Structure formats: C-alpha cells, structure tokens
Image (cartoon, grey):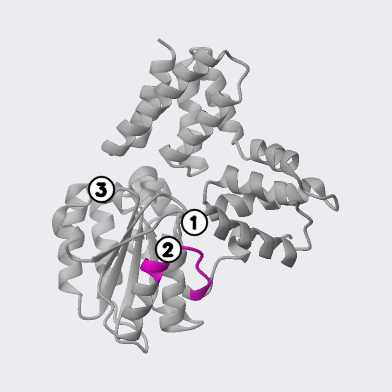
C-alpha cells in the first residue's frame, strides 16, 4: 500500500519544520532550558501546530515518546460526542460500555474525567508528561474552567499544549496559563523548495510552472501541497506534472458529499442538504472552515455568471465570519444553506 505523503513526510524533529522560525526557535530554547511551560499554539489550520508538538515530544522523549505524550482532539469530543467516545478503545475502561445509549454521563463530564485521569498519571522516566489538546476552541466555558483547574493541580508533573485557530475563544485564565506562540502558513519560496525535495525523493517529474501552480493552490499549506502533489503523481504516473495536472488534481480534492451539498443547496432541498452536512462533519470529520473552503471552490468553478458567483461568495464569506465568532460550525453551515435557498 502506498504511503500517504502527509504522514510519510511529517517531521520527526523541530529542525525539519518548515517556516515559523521564531516559534520553533523559542520551543528549542525552552527544551534546552529544561523549563518547558504550558503552551498555547495559535494560528490558521494546517500551519504546523500539531506537527511541531509531535516533533517536540519526539525530541524530549525519544522514539518511545508516546509513553509520555497524549493527544486529544477536542472537536471529536464535542462535535461527534458519544459516538466518538465509544469508538476510542482507550476510553472503554472509563465509560464501562461501548454502547452510546448506555452512557449516562454528559460529554462534558466525561471530558473532565478523561483529562483528569490522564493528567494524574505520573510520567515514565521523565520529569513531566505532555497532554496535547487540539482544536481547543471547541471547548465550552465549563470545560475550559475545569481544564484550568486540572492544569493548576498537576503542573508539577504534566505540561499542557493547547492548539487553536481562534485564541479569542479561550477564556483569559486559560490563555494566561500558557506561553502563546503564533503559527502561520509558510512562504511560497520555502514551500517550493520543500516540494522539489519531495518530488526528487519520490522520483516525480514536475515543471517549474507546475510548482508555481501548486504553491498558488496551496497558499502556504504544506499538507494541501503534499496531498495535491501525490494525487497528481498517481494520475500522471510516469508523465511530467505541469499546471494542468495540478489543476485537475485540485478539483479531485473536493469531497463528493460537498458536491452533493452544493447541488442540494442550489435546488433548495434543505432536508437533503442537512443529511450531507451530517456526513461531512460526523463521517468525514471536516471542520466548518474546510466545508466552506470546498463550497467556495465549487462556487468559483461553476458556470454561473460573475454576478451570481460574487453573490454566493459574499454569503460564504459571511458564514465564515459568523463561524469565527460562533461556537457551532454546523449551525452556521445550515444557516448558509438556508441563505442560499432564499
């Protein structure tokens, strides 16, 4: 089975991280000082926050870093709920059942219990362990206050890394517990050098125009660039990859459920559209922002008039703004569908 390049080329150490030099240098200094505090990593999606955290753990703990490093995705807890919890085998002992209907506790109560239990466990052959919580902005106020108390209680033997795209949604006491580091997408020239390196390693022939097209499409998103390049290499096989191959592969990145959602929205079938929203969020695990980006791509590539596309784009932009300020992505996607149907 062919390796997924986003996994294959995930950095094992901080020196392999592309871009965000200031934040990476600060993390290196903290590791060298043996005085790592709690961290709050913030910035757009796919800017290296998770990769940097895993690389940091690898450097601190070595090959067996997973003994002292625990990963939680807050959005899985609070957007998928009990259906996610019963799928995670590591929670079975705490839940006592794999049937979501038999779980009497609320998701918030389970989250508190899980984090408290993992934080209370002592580190193995180390001064401290690390708990990494991704998408921390999805935690509600009650959960955040509980997390703050846990951080205070176990600060002697546990460090927390919170990753978020919306730091303003974290309560002030939680933000103040950690050193805040900003991450952003990489520059075009750094991404281009990385693409050439991967292409050489994979024996993929790509033209300079192809690299320009890929950097333009990726907008500094390394994960998107790798995914598109791998798709293009599979479609082109032994042929040279140019701008057209990148364009064709970029179109294939759109989920079929997004295509159906777009079609149902245009046909004003709200009930059917809601079914595809469920599939995108619960089955595919896409965030609201990711769904909006794909809907925008669908709108921009449609055969409608410029005026119609501009009107759609404004509605999608409004939904993006409301999603930044609100807590529930699903509600904003449904509101967008209803707005399209007007």
**In the rendered view, would you say 302 is above or below 115?**
above
Residue 245 shows in the view: yes
Q: Of marks 3 and 1, which one's residue comes earlier in the chain?
A: 3
Q: Could you say which is closer to the camera, residue 56 or residue 63?
A: 56
In the picture of the structure, the residue carrying the numbered disc 1 is 186
Q: Main secondary structure of the magenta part?
A: helix
Numbered badge on residue 106: 3
Mark nearer the N terminus (1 vs 2): 2
- Magenta range: 15-24
**Residue 104 in view here:** no
Give the Cα distance between marks 1 and 2: 7 Å
Element at label 3 = loop
Q: Would you say residue 314 sits in the magenta stretch?
A: no
Q: Nearer the viewer, mark 2 or mark 3?
A: 2
Residue under the point 50% across and 68% down: 17
Residue 243 % position (x, y): 72, 42
Asked if 212 appears above or below 42 in the picture, the reply is above
- Residue 199 horizontal side relative to residue 144, left or right: right
Placement of the C terminus among the 4 image quadrants: top left
């Amino acid at each position: 089975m062919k390796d997924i390049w986003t996994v294959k080329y995930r950095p094992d150490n901080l020196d392999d991280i592309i871009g965000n030099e200031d934040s990476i240098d600060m993390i290196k200094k903290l590791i060298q000082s043996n005085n790592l505090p709690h961290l709050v990593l913030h910035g757009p999606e796919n800017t290296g926050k998770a990769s940097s955290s895993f690389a940091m753990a690898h450097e601190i703990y070595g090959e067996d870093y997973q003994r002292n490093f625990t990963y939680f995705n807050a959005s899985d807890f609070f957007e998928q709920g009990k259906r996610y919890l019963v799928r995670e085998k590591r929670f079975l002992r705490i839940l006592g059942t794999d049937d979501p209907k038999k779980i009497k506790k609320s998701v918030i109560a389970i989250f508190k219990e899980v984090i408290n239990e993992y934080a209370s466990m002592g580190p193995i052959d180390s001064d401290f362990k690390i708990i990494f919580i991704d998408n921390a902005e999805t935690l509600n106020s009650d959960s955040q206050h509980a997390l703050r108390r846990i951080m205070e209680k176990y600060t002697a033997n546990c460090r927390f890394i919170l990753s978020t795209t919306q730091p303003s949604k974290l309560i002030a006491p939680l933000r103040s517990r950690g050193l805040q580091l900003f991450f952003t997408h990489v520059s075009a020239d750094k991404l281009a050098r990385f693409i050439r390196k991967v292409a050489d390693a994979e024996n993929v022939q790509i033209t300079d125009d192809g690299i320009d097209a890929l950097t333009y499409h990726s907008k500094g998103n390394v994960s998107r660039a790798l995914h598109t390049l791998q798709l293009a290499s599979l479609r082109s096989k032994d042929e040279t990859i140019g701008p057209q191959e990148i364009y064709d592969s970029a179109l294939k990145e759109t989920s079929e459920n997004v295509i159906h959602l777009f079609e149902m929205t245009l046909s004003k079938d709200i009930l059917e559209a809601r079914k595809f929203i469920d599939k995108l969020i619960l089955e595919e695990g896409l965030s609201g922002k990711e769904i909006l980006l794909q809907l925008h791509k669908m709108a921009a590539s449609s055969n409608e008039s410029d005026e119609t596309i501009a009107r759609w784009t404004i509605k999608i932009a409004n939904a993006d703004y409301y999603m930044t300020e609100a807590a529930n992505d699903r509600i904003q996607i449904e509101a967008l569908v209803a707005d399209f149907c007007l």
